[in-house]
Image: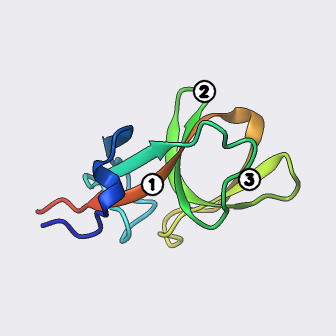
Amino acid sequence: MLTTVNKAANLPHTIWHQMRGNSMKPMISNGDYIAMQELPDWKTYFPKGEVYALEMSNGTDTVKIIRKGSDDQHLKLVPVNTKDYDEDEISITAICRVFRVIGTIHKFY
């Protein structure tokens, strides 16, 4: 059953990725699929308070709600599951690519 997929999830340049981890649970859980679209001009502007997938310069990636950081050179990464995961603040220089999460398919168990 498709739970949160919109028409944009089937457009060209949409990437589907299987989620690992539970920091965004119950919104997005381990094993769910997320639809994403890359924001090539993210350094110019992207709306805060939305869910994004970030590819980091150290080879890791994360999916979090992005908020304004302590200054213009930092972003705050906010998980939905604040019981098990903490907020984090990162330098924008550590980010290689930014993807807007546009939909999810929840895995059946």
- Circles 1 and 2, Cβ within 8 Å, touching? The answer is no
Q: Position of residue 52 (x, y in %)?
A: 53, 53
In which quadrant of the rendered image does the N terminus lie?
bottom left
Which residue occupies the foreground of this view, 81 or 13? Answer: 13
Residue under label 1: 101
Q: Is residue 49 left or right of residue 44?
A: left
Q: Residues within 10 Å of mark 2 (few under 14, many from 20)?
A: few
Q: Amino acid at mark 2?
A: Asn
In which quadrant of the rendered image does the C terminus lie?
bottom left
Q: Position of residue 5 (x, y in %)?
A: 28, 63
Q: Is residue 100 above or below residue 16?
A: below
Residue shown at 60% from the left, 27% from the top: 58
Q: Amino acid at mark 3?
A: Leu
Residue under label 2: 58
Q: Position of residue 73 (x, y in %)?
A: 84, 45
Mark 2 or mark 1, which is nearer the start of the sequence?
A: 2
Which residue occupies the foreground of this view, 75 or 60? Answer: 75
Q: Which picture quadrant has residue 95?
A: top right
Q: Amino acid at mark 1?
A: Val
Q: Which mark is residue 87?
A: none
Residue under label 3: 75
